[in-house]
Image (cartoon, helix red, strand yellow):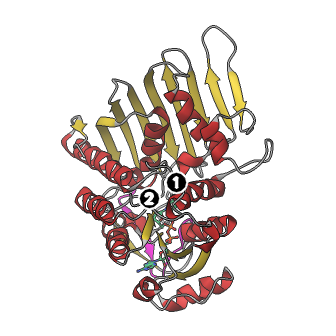
Amino acid sequence: MASRTTRPITEIGAAVVGTGFIGEVHVEALRRLGVQVRGVVGSSHARAEERAAALALPPAYESFQAMLADTQVEVVHITSPNYLHYPQAKAALAAGKHVICEKPLTMTSTESAELVRLAEASELVNAVNFNLRYYPICQHLHQFVREGGLGDVRLVSGHYLQDWLLLDTDWNWRLEPALGGKLRAVADIGSHWMDLTSHVTGRQIVSVMADLKTFIPVRQQPTGPVETFARTGGPTSARTITTEDCATILLRFDNGAIGNLTISQISAGRRNTLEFEVDGSNSAAAWNSERPDELWIGHRGRPNEILPRDPSLLNAEGRAAASLPAGHNEGFADTFKALYRSVYRAVAGDGPSEPEYPTFADGHDSMLVCEAVARSAQQGTWASVAPT
Ligand SMILES: NC(=O)c1ccc[n+]([C@@H]2O[C@H](COP(=O)([O-])OP(=O)(O)OC[C@H]3O[C@@H](n4cnc5c(N)ncnc54)[C@H](O)[C@@H]3O)[C@@H](O)[C@H]2O)c1
């Protein structure tokens, strides 16, 4: 990475592409950090104008190209549907912008490999938005495991369950392979679980055995546009669905550890529940995204512990991700702030020589794991994750 002059984060200008569910979360996190949000880009200028006004932002850009032409924009956040990530990230890098791109990084590993190559050649800051790593408890666990707190990692298990696509009347662009990719639940939320557990354990997934299932083969698509997580009425047309509603996956890690993961977008009552447990040779640790400020630590020869997200009890990595004092709950939106604090330190020329945040290389690794999942499910055998 090229050396840069250190300067205040408040001098850095950013633009956010996509004004849906997660685009707004990006905007709010940037504002909390003091980054100048110069504007947003939407699917149409009219829609972007409406969202910009609602968020009290400067007038929206006329187009993606107009945003790239703004020399005050140094960092581009890409929060559009998945099929746009590759062309938009590529164009932003070519325009000399640092890029923070939502997951999944691209539609294929061929595309993600090219983005890694382009980003490295450009020496621009590149990050993939695996924000869940930045729950302070998860950052604490990352350091704790690295320092041997659990002993050798042996077993990694858990699930990521949602219910927002339970009914055949539930619709979103993620259901369409051309917009979201051939994998749906696995790429959309399974990618988060697999990245998070790889991060906290420091271990790579090397092979997988996957079973994918589409329980709702025909859905009713509203004839008008639909916001993510929105429930709609009105006219619909029947559409055949090929992307998976749920998946079970066995995992093998590079140190010999094994694991299993259940992923679903059709689990009634589970709005957004990610849980994992890591069992080591000395102790175990478990975390649940619905109680994000607590880490369960399991022991054999003494009572188990609950570590609260108390900055005075967390290690350096956990403390660095925390924003609030103990007892004042932190949540999903706070992880974006903590992630961008790390990324924008690098943009400001003030970061460590090696990025601490997830980069395009991590996004590419995730694509390779997802492609192994698809291959395994298709062939009914274990599939190795292709080398990077
Ligand atoms: N990190 C996370 O926790 C997290 C959570 C949700 C979504 N995501 C990712 O964020 C992305 C967006 O998901 P979402 O849930 O916000 O979807 P969404 O449908 O709510 O928002 C997508 C937005 O992109 C806009 N858009 C469409 N075409 C565009 C174009 N050509 N140029 C600019 N904008 C365009 C749409 O109008 C919409 O406002 C996806 O890649 C998804 O995987 C990540």
Three-letter amino acid code of the residue under disc 1:
Gly
Three-letter amino acid code of the residue under disc 2:
Ala
382 vs 273: above or below: above
63 vs 376: above or below: below
In magenta stretch: residue 221? yes
Q: Is residue 193 left or right of residue 8?
A: left
Q: Residue furthest left?
A: 379
Residue of label 1 = 351
Q: Which residues are magenta?
A: 215-230
Q: Residue furthest top?
A: 301
In magenta stretch: residue 1? no
Q: Residue at x 46, y 49 (%)?
A: 192
Disc 2 on helix, strand or loop? strand
Q: Residue at x 38, y 75 (%)?
A: 96
Q: Is residue 297 left or right of residue 62?
A: right
156 vs 66: above or below: above
The quadrant of the picture occupied by the N terminus is: bottom left
Residue of label 2 = 127
* Residue 190 point in image, percent of width and height: 43, 47
Residue 13: quarter of image:
bottom right
* Residue 150 point in image, percent of width and height: 53, 21
Q: Residue at x 55, y 58 (%)?
A: 345
Instruction: Give the distance between the C-alpha atoms of the residues marked 1 and 2, in whole angstroms.
Output: 13 Å
